[in-house]
């Protein structure tokens, strides 16, 4: 008798065959769904990218010039000057502020009836050029000073927001004979991070990828409007949005972010000159930095005239407290003149 080869399918029961058929059917459906999801994601990312490219091009033509260009280190640095006062106030922005001149507008309008106000837009900010030069405190301070020299501004009050408190501290030690007073607007203090290395929660590479892909624009669109409470007109807000996105994490600012730890370290042993009047306007102790007010009180403890004032608000105090800042600042400067 001839033996027939037994195949697997001959051993399968009808139930087994039905189960196998169902598995194949569901696997096919699953693969189609996954393929559909992949295609949908690719299409979504492609649309986001194209919209971002078109928006970037469109917004370039909507930027309205303001201020004036000053040649610094062979590049253009933008400076807005407003007011005709006898004394000059020089405003320096916080890290990554896309358009300093417009961001400071509420404060400039409060100060300009009494002072000549110059808002510096460092390289990488506002309408200023970018630069490949290392964003060290030394270089930033030198560039700001060169801009003021070219504008023939040789005696002034330095008013600094956020990280410019670090640059300002170095500045007043190098050019003490030019600065008549220092004002900090929730300004950084050299020892605020202690021995910690200052790092961003998201890597610069990731953020750059988000920006180039257009996802950063989409996230900003879906997020709360950061300019909603700023007392400026809608046209100014639109310019702020355009320029802030244009300058968002550009190479110059990325380099400055990466230089934060070394820049804080470079000023940790610096103090304000004893005879320099210093006043700090701070938000309450809710910044996530322990002893925020104490850090600044420590900075003015040896000053002939030093003050620390707390105002309700966010880190960008000048957005909502410009009137109070201007009034208290003027009172402070009257005290300075009385002491002379």
Image (tube, rainbow, N blue to C red):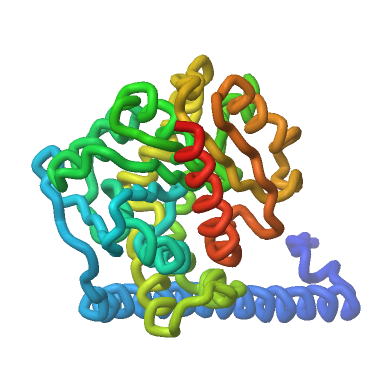
Q: Is residue 4 above or below residue 187?
A: below
In the displayed structure, does residue 109 sit left or right of residue 184? left
Report whether residue 6 is seen.
yes
Residue sitting at the far top: 269
- Left or right? Give the position of 199 relative to 83: right
Q: Quadrant of residue 119?
A: bottom left
From the viewer's perspective, tell me whether residue 233 is left or right of residue 76: right
Q: Is residue 79 left or right of residue 203?
A: left
Whether residue 24 is situated above or below residue 115 in the rendered picture: below
| Label tally | 0
User: Where is 77 relative to 45, above or below?
Assistant: above
Q: Is residue 157 above or below residue 99?
A: above
Q: Quadrant of the C terminus?
A: top left
Residue found 66% across the figure and 45% down from its top: 309
Q: Residue 105 in the image: state x and y as whole percent.
A: 41, 67
Q: Residue at x 39, y 47 (%)?
A: 92
- Tell me where residue 196 appears, x and y as whole percent: 63, 24
* Quadrant housing the N terminus: bottom right
Counting from the top left corner in percent of width and height, residue 286 is at 75, 47
Report which quarter residue 79 is drawn in: bottom left
Residue at horizontal 50%, vertical 26%?
264
Regarding residue 35, the answer to whether it shows in the image is no
Front-most of residues 140 and 32 = 140
Which residue lies at the image location 52% right of the left edge and 19% below the top edge? 268
Residue 120 pos. (x, y %): 30, 51
């Amino acid at each position: 008798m001839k033996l027939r080869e037994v195949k697997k399918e001959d051993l399968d029961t009808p139930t087994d065959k039905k189960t196998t058929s169902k598995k194949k059917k569901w696997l096919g459906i699953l693969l189609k769904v996954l393929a559909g999801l992949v295609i949908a994601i690719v299409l979504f990312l492609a649309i986001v990218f194209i919209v971002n490219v078109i928006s970037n091009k469109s917004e370039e033509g909507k930027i309205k010039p303001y201020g004036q260009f000053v040649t610094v280190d062979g590049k253009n640095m933008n400076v807005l000057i407003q007011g005709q006062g006898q004394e000059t106030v020089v405003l320096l922005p916080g890290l990554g502020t896309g358009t300093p001149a417009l961001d400071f507008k509420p404060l400039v309008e409060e100060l300009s009836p009494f002072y000549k106000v110059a808002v510096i837009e460092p390289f990488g900010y506002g309408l200023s050029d970018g630069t490949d030069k290392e964003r060290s405190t030394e270089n930033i301070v030198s560039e700001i000073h060169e801009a003021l020299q070219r504008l023939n501004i040789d005696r002034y009050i330095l008013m600094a927001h956020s990280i410019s408190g670090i640059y300002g501290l170095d500045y007043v030690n190098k050019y003490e004979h030019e600065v008549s007073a220092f004002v900090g607007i929730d300004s950084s203090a050299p020892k605020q991070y202690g021995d910690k290395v200052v790092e961003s929660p998201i890597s610069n590479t990731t953020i750059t990828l988000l920006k180039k892909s257009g996802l950063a624009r989409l996230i900003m669109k879906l997020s709360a409007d950061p300019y909603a409470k700023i007392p400026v007109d809608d046209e100014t807000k639109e310019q702020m949005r355009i320029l802030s996105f244009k300058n968002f994490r550009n190479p110059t600012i990325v380099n400055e972010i990466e230089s934060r730890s070394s820049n804080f370290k470079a000023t940790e042993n610096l103090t304000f000159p004893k005879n320099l009047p210093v006043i700090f306007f701070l938000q309450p102790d809710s910044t996530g930095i322990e002893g925020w007010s104490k850090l600044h009180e420590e900075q003015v403890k040896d000053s002939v005239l030093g003050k620390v004032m707390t105002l309700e608000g966010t880190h960008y105090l000048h957005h909502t407290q410009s009137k109070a800042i201007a009034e208290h600042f003027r009172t402070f400067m009257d005290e300075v003149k009385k002491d002379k």
